[in-house]
Image: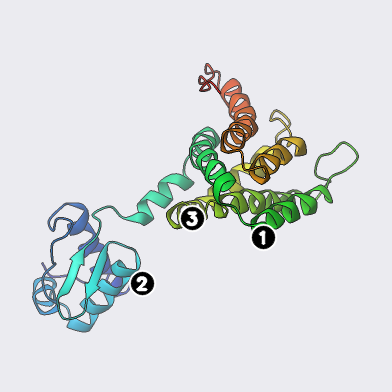
Amino acid sequence: MALQAAGRRSLVDTVVDALRAQLTAGEWPVGSRIPTEHALAEQLQVGRNTVREAVRVLVHAGMLRSRQGEGTFVVSTADPGDILRGVRRAGIRDVLELRIALEAEAARLAALRHRPDDLERMRAALNAQAELTDASGQPGSGSLELYADHDIAFHQAVVDAAHNTALTATYGWFSSSVREALVSALDDQAMPKIVHGDHRAVLDAIAAGDPDAAERATRDLLEKPKRAVEALLGEPPTATPPH
């Protein structure tokens, strides 16, 4: 399979695409070793340095893993980049549903595992957000972006307080979609406004070490905008699990 660079794209990019296509097609199962650089270079009719750089890209993407002296092995046949792009294309309701799934469990774990500095991060984020509110308790004109940043900082602090590396990493790449949806909601008069008391309830439950209350408070906080979105879409509200 001879490859040629197209337009302004580099030959490395072209090889990355070719290898990614073979991975996602299942040509090399998870756990298997991919062909050597020499074999891939011959197959793709490119130099070994080009193959080496392309493999590095896919190692960094989490699809491959190199083992010194053993070769390069398949870690995943799903491209994390495609997953991320799918999340970014998701609508606000989809983002809120995923937030509930992630943040409710994070709050539960945070109530059990938090440290004093975790609580300080949550309080600092809420206090900074409160300073941007006007007399009605809503963000003042021109401060929506910064207001959203403080809101995300609070929720990220809750997730980090769960002290679960996988959860923190997942929420970290998901947070850009959360922020985008939040800014959109803040600028939409049909969406319910943020209530600081709801956030304080999450913080208080975590500080008290009450996992059930922390999960419940998080669900209550996020169910409000989700119900509003469902109403705007003309869809029946999703049933909320009993507390």
Please name the residue that numbered disc 3 is placed on: 173
Q: Is residue 48 left or right of residue 144?
A: left
Whichever of callouts 1 and 2 sits on the residue coming sooner in the sequence is 2
Name the quadrant containing residue 12: bottom left
Label 2: how many residues lie within 10 Å, few (<14), some (14-19) or many (20+)?
Answer: few
Check the image and tell me how it is coloured. rainbow
Q: Is residue 220 above or below residue 62?
A: above
Residue drawn at point x = 80 percent, y = 44 percent: 139
Q: Is residue 97 left or right of residue 59?
A: right
Q: Is residue 123 above or below residue 93?
A: below
Measured in 3D between alpha carbons, the distance from the residue under mark 3 to the one under mark 1, in whole angstroms, is: 23 Å
- Identify residue type, mark 1: Asp
Most foreground residue, 84 or 73: 73
Please name the residue that numbered disc 1 is placed on: 117
In the rendered image, residue 186, in percent from the top left (x then y), is placed at 71, 40
Whichever of callouts 2 and 3 sits on the residue coming sooner in the sequence is 2
- Identify residue type, mark 3: Trp
In the rendered image, residue 196, in percent from the top left (x then y), is placed at 76, 39
Q: Looking at this rendering, what residue extends furthest in the right direction?
A: 135
Q: Is residue 187 visible?
A: no
